Image: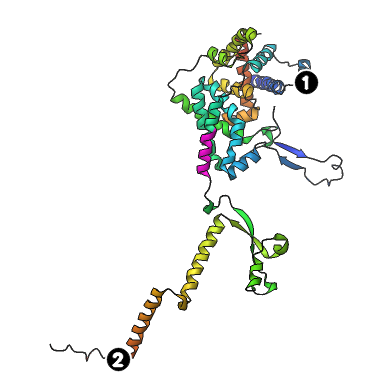
Amino acid sequence: MARPVFGRVSVPGRASSAPAERPARVAHLDRDRPLVEAAQRDPLAFDALYRRYLAQVYSYAFYELGDHHEAEDATERTFVAALTNLGRFQERARPADGDGASTFRVWLFQIARNAVANQRRGRRRHPQVPIEAAALVADPLDLEGGASARDEAAAAWLAIGRLPADRRRALVLRFVEEMSTAEIAGILGRSEGAVRVLIHRALRSVAQDLGHER
Amino acid sequence: MPLDRDAASADALLTDLYLDALLAGVVLDLTTVRDVTEGRGLDPALVRAAERLRHDLVRVHPSFRFEERLALQLAEAAAGLQVPLAVGGNGRLVPFPIPSAREGPIPDGADAARLFDLDPTIRRDRTRPLLIGGALTSAAISIAGAALVAWRLGRPGRAAPMARAARAVREARLAAATALPTIDPVTVRRRPH
């Protein structure tokens, strides 16, 4: 899992010789900063950010909407909006954001969340049932294990599909996108503590649904 | 109630730590977690559910065709967003020669051409950056245009033929007017037809 946004830069062996009043230098390590700055200078450089986050945004949209075509539409809107508004993006990372977290990613997923919400409002198609979606993502080459894996995946998909929207969203961001609690909090507009409790309760619901009650 | 809330927060924090380790691929000894958390352990059902979700909730990739189509669309949009050269996009910095005061006035002729040698090792102290292709160039061109017009207007000998003709007519009229005797408007009478 990715991490440090902020990290102390210290040279081994020199810490003791440094003056006591001298504060440790803090370096920002947002992994997307060079790409974002390049894209802000030249919009054509946005392609690198697009390639990095396409699958994540698409996957998030697919889990939210349950339909490939709608997920494509939401993904398209997300990236077009991100490209258009990239000049206004400002990095606002905090030490609490965790190691290797990206404020750009949080910003991008905030756009994706809005795009998905708009897509849902205007949706005409019926979402695919989770078992069909699970069949689409099951390994087609694993013929023997395919059926059971598909059943298990379908059960998991059904379990998260039955969750309230905010819990489902938090679980998808945590497990599929492998985001930190801080990043999810930034996307959902909640405190980190609230997100932790949200995920904990969601996981408990899934556990009960999957037949793992205490 | 506060105790329940604290307990829920502690459980949530413990779950969060476990998920951090799980998603990072760290094999976690749950007994260690239990020791660290002073007896509070993770619910085994939660652990199993988390492992199940970790395995089954896979990332879904879009089709290659969609990826390339959207990439093309974004490239077109990006090309439209590129700032035009005249307003500050894609500029490049080149040294702009400025003679320093201690080196005296600007030399003319061949010496003046030497000033425009852009080799930074030769005249680094006499140059300042100029953005070519950007806003400064645009402004410089505007200023140069105004200076050119002012210079040309200030040099009547090199004006265009039409301007010379107009100026000659105007000067002739002024000369004729000064040559006429002053007339008292009271004495002017209309001639009888």
Which residue shows up at 62% across the image and 7% down it? A148
**Which residue position is annotated with label 2?**
B182
Q: Quadrant of residue B61?
A: top right
Q: Would residue A8 be visible to someone looking at this image?
A: yes
Q: Mainly helix, strand or loop, the magenta region?
A: helix
Q: Amino acid at mark 1?
A: Val
* Whole-number angstrom distance, CA of label 1 to CA of label 2: 115 Å
* Left or right of B53 on screen, residue B178: left
Picture coordinates of residue A69, whole percent (x, y)? 49, 23
Picture coordinates of residue B79, whole percent (x, y)? 52, 42
The quadrant of the rendering that contains the C terminus of chain B is: bottom left
Relative to B72, residue B141 above or below: below
Chain letter of the residue carrying label 2: B
| SS for dot 2 | loop
Chain letter of the residue carrying label 1: B
Relative to A49, residue A63 above or below: above
* Left or right of A110 on screen, residue A124: left
| SS for dot 1 | helix
Picture coordinates of residue B85, whole percent (x, y)? 54, 51
Q: Which residues are magenta?
A: B71-83
**Which residue position is annotated with label 1?**
B36
